[in-house]
Amino acid sequence: MSSLKDVSDAGVAIWLDDLSRDRLESGSLAGLIASSHVVGVTTNPSIFSAAISKSDKYSADIKELAAQGSTVDQIVTRLTTDDVRAACDLFLDTYQATAGADGRVSIEVEPNLAYNTERTISRAIELHEIVNRPNVLIKVPATVEGLPAIEELTARGISINVTLIFSVERYEQVVDAYLRGLEKRLGKGENLSDIHSVASFFISRLDTQVDKQLDENHPGSPFRGTAAIANAHLAYESFLRISHSDRWQKLATAGANYQRPLWASTGVKDKSYDSTRYVVELVAANCVNTMPESTLNELREHGVVRGDTITSELTKSHRTLEALAESGVNIADINRKLEDAAVAGFATAWEELLANVAAAAK
């Protein structure tokens, strides 16, 4: 348990990357809040697809809503927003104790809207109104089309979890969109202090792809397993630089809150690696780490937390990415492909969810 406390004390908020009605009704989530330093929850289409398709706790609602004439899309919206609302209520004390920074529960705009700015904006507003809780975060993908949506939603006072960020360049564009939204509000004399945001930077998938290239072209490379952490370190370097800028200081003086870097996809896919590496190597102030319960358990059982493991490693991380480039690894190209694959993957999960609910409604 001390590892969980150590991570939290070092400035990293622990969020759980999972939600289901089983978890809500069994008291599992409440237990993690009470005893495991969990201060938030993230969801995505894959999580909801697994939750709803593998549990009978949704069956009665599906049948009842279908009998009332609800469409499959309406049923899925009802099920997912009900679960998110219930989780928001569980986290209300945390939300209040942290002045709105934590105690957050995320729900994602449907992935088939990822390349449509206007529909992303309208759906995000709808989800925000349906959940109707101050501690909900609306997830918007960091596609090119998502950037103006982030700006507009922030300007409207909606707190956003920007998801599917793979590159430092896109991360900086996301931060710029957040700041532009805040600046619009400031220009209108509107409140900034009740807006919170996180920028979800995906970790493990980059190592999977880079390691594959290294294994094919440079067997035994000492840079195997180094790309993802180095990439994230440089995103945090950008966070530090921006947070010390005059632009940010003007907003902060007006009450603005950081858009915290959130480390996502932190479960280790290569079992030869330490299962806690994407937590303990990404510790610094003002971060969030959302993790599956298996990673949370591994961290509790054997995680070795060494305090801040980012700021002292920035020079080394630059050198690591330079060495990978010299080895022929095109990180930028890999990150572009990862973004496309992630959007497609979540779209597939969403379609599976719709199909499963349609079958259960018959």
Image (cartoon, rainbow, N blue to C red):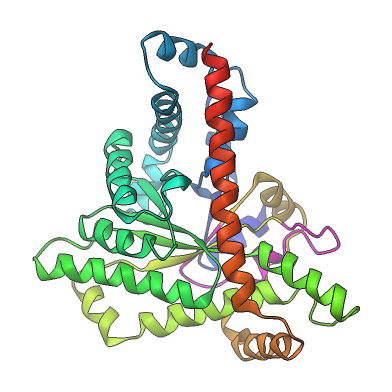
Answer left or right for 352 relative to 71: right
Percent coordinates x, y for residue 68 in the rendering: 36, 10
Nearer-the-camera pick, 98 or 55: 55
Q: Residue furthest right?
A: 220
Q: Which residues are magenta?
A: 268-289
Residue visible at 44% across and 43% down in the picture: 110
Would residue 8 be counted in the magenta stretch? no
Q: Is residue 281 magenta?
A: yes
Q: Is residue 77 left or right of residue 312?
A: left
Image side of residue 74 versus residue 4, left or right:
left
**Residue 3, located in which quarter of the rendered image?**
bottom right
Considering only vertical position in the picture, is 78 above or below 31?
above
Specify whether residue 216 is in view: yes
One can see residue 307 in this view: no
Magenta segment's dominant SS is loop
Residue 200 higher or lower than 283, as above or below? above
Specify the quadrant of the image occupied by residue 31.
top right
At which x and y percent is residue 255?
22, 68
Q: Nearer the viewer, residue 319 or 211?
A: 211
- How many numbered markers are drawn? 0
Q: Is residue 60 left or right of residue 7?
A: left
Vertical placement of residue 124 versus 67, above or below: below
State the image coordinates of residue 238 (x, y, percent, origin top left). 46, 81
Q: Quadrant of residue 202?
A: bottom right
Q: Residue at x 62, y 33 (%)?
A: 50
User: x%, y% of residue 330?
Assistant: 66, 80
Q: Residue at x 51, y 77 (%)?
A: 168
